[in-house]
Amino acid sequence: MIKHSEEFKQEAVRIALTSGLPRERVASDLGIGKSTLNKWVSHYRPSDLVSAPQADLARENERLRLENRILREEREVLKNRRRLSPPVRGRNGSCYGAAGRVAADGLLEA
């Protein structure tokens, strides 16, 4: 019987809980049995495995994801508003470029 270190067990539990892979796959990748991995998971609580800096990073990631989602939604609203609004007409609008004014002035004088 192989004796695994506490660090190995804790890392195996962290991988099992955070990788998104099935426990059978994690256990086989690590060369241990599924029941052994399940025992370790029940023995080591996730709070024992997450250090304070990792918890801070997780909170920061979540905050940034939320901010990113809000910014994407705001950008979509602005893009839709621009697409739906009529073109600007008037003295400062896009219909009156400098070259367009000169050409129009030349036609009126002739």
Image (cartoon, helix red, strand yellow):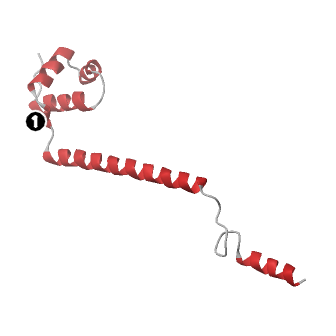
Image position of 83 (left or right of 96): left
Q: Residue at x 25, y 21 (%)?
A: 23
Figure label count: 1
Image coordinates for residue 41, horizontal then vertical, percent? 15, 24
Relative placement, left or right, of 34 versus 82 is left
Q: Quadrant of the C terminus?
A: bottom right
Report x, y in % for residue 78. 50, 55
Q: Which residue lies at the image location 10% right of the left edge and 28% below the top edge?
A: 44
Q: Secondary structure at mark 1?
A: helix
Q: Residue at x 14, y 28 (%)?
A: 9
- Image: 5 above or below 107: above
Q: Residue shown at 14%/33% (left/top)?
A: 46
Q: Nearer the viewer, residue 107 or 33?
A: 107
Q: Quadrant of the N terminus?
A: top left
Around disc 1, counting alpha carbons within 10 Å, would you say few (fewer than 14), some (14 to 19), or many (20 or more)? few
| Residue identified by numbered label 1 | 48
Residue type at mark 1?
Asp
Left or right: residue 60 versus residue 73 is left
The one nearer the camera, 33 or 61, is: 61
> Residue 61 versus residue 108: which sits nearer the camera?
108
Q: Residue furthest right?
A: 110
Residue 76 % position (x, y): 49, 50
Q: Nearer the viewer, residue 33 or 92?
A: 92
The image shows residue 105 at horizontal and vertical percentages of 81, 81
Whether residue 5 is situated above or below residue 57 in the rendered picture: above
